Image (cartoon, rainbow, N blue to C red):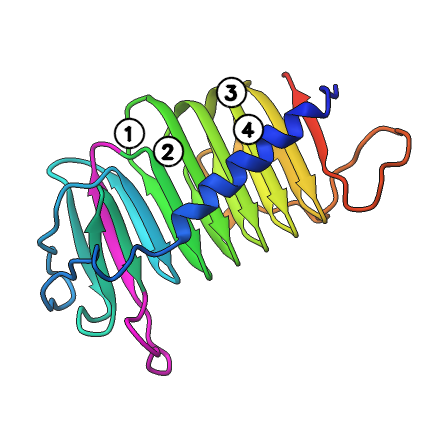
Amino acid sequence: MYRIRGILLGAGVIGLTLLSLAIPPTKTQMQPVVSVHPQQALPLAPFTSVQLNGVKAVLQYGSPQRVTLLKGSGDISLITVTQERLVIDKCRDKCPRGYQLQVEIVTPLINAIAVANGGVIESRGDFPLQPAMSLAVSHGGTVDARAILANNITAAVAQGGRILANPKMTMVASVSNGGVITYWGNAQVTSSTQHGGVVNKGAAIDLDKPMSDVEAPESCTPDTPDTPARPAGAKRSRTIVI
């Protein structure tokens, strides 16, 4: 069923706020870690959120909090913590041809995840229930947060990408210029799409499957009941109660 259009403004603002996580901090804020080699834990300050730029990562529940370089070089990549946000850039400058960066992130607490430029993060383990979680993808990439059950989730995809989420009570989801947000459970979901995108409920059988085995919807335009024509470029908003 459709809510009043006023929900669009809120969803759009939330989407922009989430995607702002992908804006790197200024150079004066950055404190690069020392050079490390693969399989070494990195000396980092505590963090509560994660931001990845072109990086493949596994997010594992556990303690103590740590980040381990699985593949790549600390001399080529940039890994910092600023204002309790772990920021990992695949390359400091131009990436060498064929260079890949893979990391393992272990933490007992996480409240925000942002991925950009083809980054991928997959959550694993038995995370405790989180009160709130923010998820964002921009310019391609995937956030698999199925292992992190949260009461309230805000999720945003822009310019392509995918989010897999597990809300318990509510979720506000927005997609612009292509992308997919798939959720599990019986939460109340308010969604908006603009210029292509899908917000859909995942099949129960897919909840525990590996990320690579969870198929994305074939269409980038969700099915909707017949409604009066909307002006070009107008957003679509709906609330789904299962």
Mark 2: few/some/many CA within 10 Å (<14, 14-19, 20+): many
What x and y, as percent, mark residue 37?
13, 68
Mark 4: few/some/many CA within 10 Å (<14, 14-19, 20+): many
Is residue 104 found left or right of 39 in the rendered image? right
Labels 2 and 1: the sequence-earlier one:
1
Is residue 37 found left or right of 206 in the rendered image? left
Mark 1: few/some/many CA within 10 Å (<14, 14-19, 20+): few
Name the dominant secondary structure of the magenta segment. Answer: loop
User: Which residues make up the magenta segment?
Assistant: 90-109
Q: Which residue is mark 1?
A: 126
User: Do the CB atoms of the residues marked 2 and 1 lie less than 8 Å apart?
Assistant: yes
Disc 4 marks a residue whose amino acid type is Val
Q: Is residue 100 above or below residue 18?
A: below
Q: CA distance from mark 1 to mark 3?
A: 20 Å
Q: Which residue is mark 3?
A: 170
- Looking at the rendered structure, the secondary structure element under dot 1 is loop
Q: Is residue 214 above or below residue 171?
A: below
Q: Which residue is mark 4?
A: 172
User: Do the CB atoms of the residues marked 3 and 4 lie less than 8 Å apart?
Assistant: yes
Q: CA distance from mark 2 to mark 3?
A: 17 Å
